[in-house]
Image: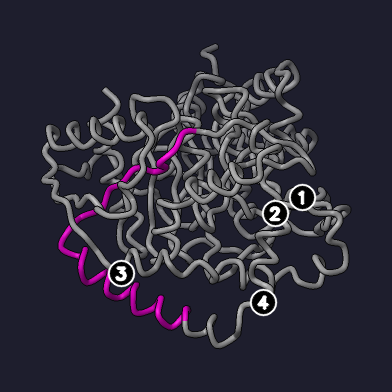
Amino acid sequence: MADPLKMSASELGEAFENNLIDPVEALEAFFDAIQKNTLTDRIYVEVTKARAVGEAEDARKRQKFNARTGPLDGVPVSWKDLFDVAGHQTNAGSDLLKGRIPKNDCAILKLASINGLVTLGKTHMSELAFSGLGLNPITQTPPCVNDLGAVAGGSSSGAAASVAFGLAPAAIGSDTGGSVRIPAAWNDLVGLKTTVGRVSMEGVVPLCRSFDTVGPIVKTVDDAALLFSVLTGNKPVDLKSKPFEGGRLAILKGTALNDLQQKPALAFEESVKALSKFGFKIEEIEVAEVESALALSSLVPTEAYAEWRDEIEASPELMYEKILQRFLGGRDVLASDYLKATSDLEVFKRMYVNKVSEFDAVILPTCPILPPNLERLKSDNGYYVSQNLMALRNTRIANLLGICALTIPTNHPSCGVSIMALPNMEEKLLRIGRAAELAIRK
């Protein structure tokens, strides 16, 4: 049997389709890897073994009778611990929610089950999803695959680690300010941030409903396209018969290119050259509204505090101090300031779309920094604050502007390139991403 641990989700699904691998045997291979890996407790909150076995056995039956429900039928997937899984604690990385056991699966887990995906387990995350670093002293801090002494990126830290360490073929995370793309980039994976409202948030523990989105963390753009189709209940995006050739890309000048560490800067420079050589026409542009949107720093903390005010004020001692302070940053914002900021942001969104609509996509370094050191983050508050802000700086652009974005790996460890498309243009984004993947990862 070919090794399922080394396959992408789409490759594993294809192996099932061709009867090369048995879904139950594949699941057992992942169980074995999870059991043997000394880092498992830092990655998985829980392995949902009984449920996974039942779902894999059902997938085996469908395989036997040529009745598979889709290209990912039988593929195991890990779930960030803010997605409700019936009968299993869903705490969103916080003791504020300790003992919370939902009665029903979240809406997208129901879709995943209909499509035959196997629920492998639940993964650790930043507390209440409010950090781009992935540090969580309250529960566990997953490691980065390229540096065991560094954080994995947040807030979907365990989701990315589960795939990067070969403990899941694919993972589902959430992204409010970069929480899919940062850990994907730092662990050399593909991460898709969807447009707000494109994927159901029903049964997902919220952080900031105006910006919360769901997306996959996977090994390839093909995987991202297949999982996007599952999460939205649509037909898979056709990446093979409709390849994206040529096209115009814009490099976003300004803040997104400032203060890059050496390796992310080099990775982006080489990627731009590769994309140009592949046939993309690339030019630099400045969009003042991006800088204006980034200046609206109070929006997420204000809404996040409003969401969790009662729980936080009742038991602040249960929270990690640095996360608590981020929430409290929204406590004293005037309602008039918040409403003015939301109104201004809508104007910036429209102006951005007007200025970039002539391009097929906009590109930028996913993250300006490499994964920070875990121990220093715990002991040095200034380092924590600065690294968290820098980690989220570039990814926040897509969230604030309400657009979709994809990060793909480069040839440099923990350095990703982000591709941003207009709202609800995920299908086009994925086709561009597939072409960029071919161009860059040679």
Disc 2 designates what residue? 323
Where does the image place residue 129, in percent across and percent down from the top left? 64, 53
Q: At label 3, which amino acid type do we have?
A: Glu
Q: Is residue 103 magenta?
A: no
Q: Quadrant of residue 52?
A: top right
Numbered disc in front, either 4 or 2: 4
Query: Which residue is nearer to you in this view: 64 or 238?
Result: 238
Label 4 environment density (alpha carbons within 10 Å; few <14, some 14–19, many ≥20): few
Q: Is residue 26 left or right of residue 17?
A: right
Residue 50 in the image: state x and y as whole percent: 80, 35
Q: Which residues are magenta?
A: 341-370
- Kind of residue at badge 1: Tyr
Q: Nearer the viewer, mark 4 or mark 3?
A: 4
Residue at the bottom extreme of this rendering: 336
Residue 30, above or below 326 = above
Q: Which residue is mark 1?
A: 320
Q: Are marks 2 and 1 in contact (CB under 8 Å)?
A: yes
Quadrant containing the N terminus in the rendered view? top right
Question: Which is more N-terminal, label 3 or label 4?
Answer: 3
According to the image, label 4 marks what residue?
Answer: 332
Q: CA distance from mark 2 to mark 1?
A: 6 Å
Percent coordinates x, y for residue 351 in the rendering = 27, 74
- Name the side, left or right, on which 100 lies relative to 160: right
Q: Which residue: 13% across, 37% down?
A: 276
- Residue 70 has which mark? none
Q: Earlier in the sequence, mark 1 or mark 4?
A: 1
Task: Indicate which disc residue 289 carries.
Answer: 3
- Distance between mark 4 and mark 3 Cα atoms: 26 Å
Q: Which mark is first along the chain, 2 or 3?
A: 3
Amino acid at circle 2: Ile
